[in-house]
Image: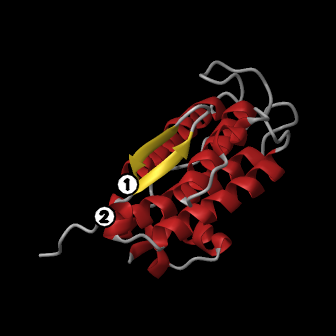
Amino acid sequence: MPTFDPCRTARKLAYNNALANHRLHDACRRLMPGEFEAVRASFFPSIKATLNHSLTVDWFYVDALEGGTLGPSAWDIEEPFDDIATLATEQAKVDRRLVALCEAATPEKLASVTEIHRTERIQRERMEDVLNHLFQHQTHHRGQVHAMLAGTSVRPPQLDEFIVADDSRFRSGDIAALGWSEDDLMR
């Protein structure tokens, strides 16, 4: 019987995160003028604000996971990007960093302490706990954008069919667009 492999789980979640972001941003690229920034009912007041928040928080945590000291300056500009094309490009960059970080993970590394630079202190957490928090944060806000898309001209995309082998038929185009293979995702 196979044993649980936390490194495999981290890798799969990082790929899932990037795939879901890719698909969600692709849908947002098809919005009509004004829909991206339109005020909507959600935690953040627009699709634009929510996706910018997700990106800046990713910058913050991925930098910390990489051993950096970016800290709260990650969100010095609350909404750094006004258009989905640039925002999606920047999100894809940080998603690739997160995939690379998880590809290189070992059980020892996942159990190691990550230093997160806060305004007046250093927060110390296990790497695996920071990763779990980051994946949950992304899922939470993608869900909000997904719901907001329902009030636009664009149908919300399917976001939850990436993690199991049987769903490969639904993701082949996304995987090709990202330059991955099924082997990358399923090993």
- As drawn, 12 above or below 44: below
SS class, disc 1: helix
Which residue does the image show at 68% across and 42% down from the upper left?
Answer: 56
Callout 1 amino acid: Glu
Are the residues at dot 1 and dot 2 in contact (C-beta closer than 8 Å)? yes
Q: Position of residue 131 (x, y in %)?
A: 44, 52
Secondary structure beneath dot 2 equals helix
Query: Residue 10, relative to residue 54: is it above or below?
Result: below
**Residue receiving disc 2:** 6
Q: Which residue is mark 1?
A: 128
Front residue of 132 and 143? 132
Residue 86, x across and y down, in percent: 82, 51
The residue sitting at the left extreme is 1
Q: Residue at x 49, y 49 (%)?
A: 115
Q: Residues within 10 Å of mark 2 (few under 14, many from 20)?
A: some
* Residue lying at 51% horizontally and 50% vertically, measured from the top left: 159
Image quarter in which the C terminus is found = bottom left
Across and down, in percent, residue 15 comes to 50, 64
Tell me the quadrant of the picture where the N terminus can be found. bottom left
- Residue positioned 66% across, 33% down in the render: 50
Whether residue 3 is visible to the viewer of this picture, yes or no, is: yes
The answer to whether residue 129 is above or below residue 185 is above
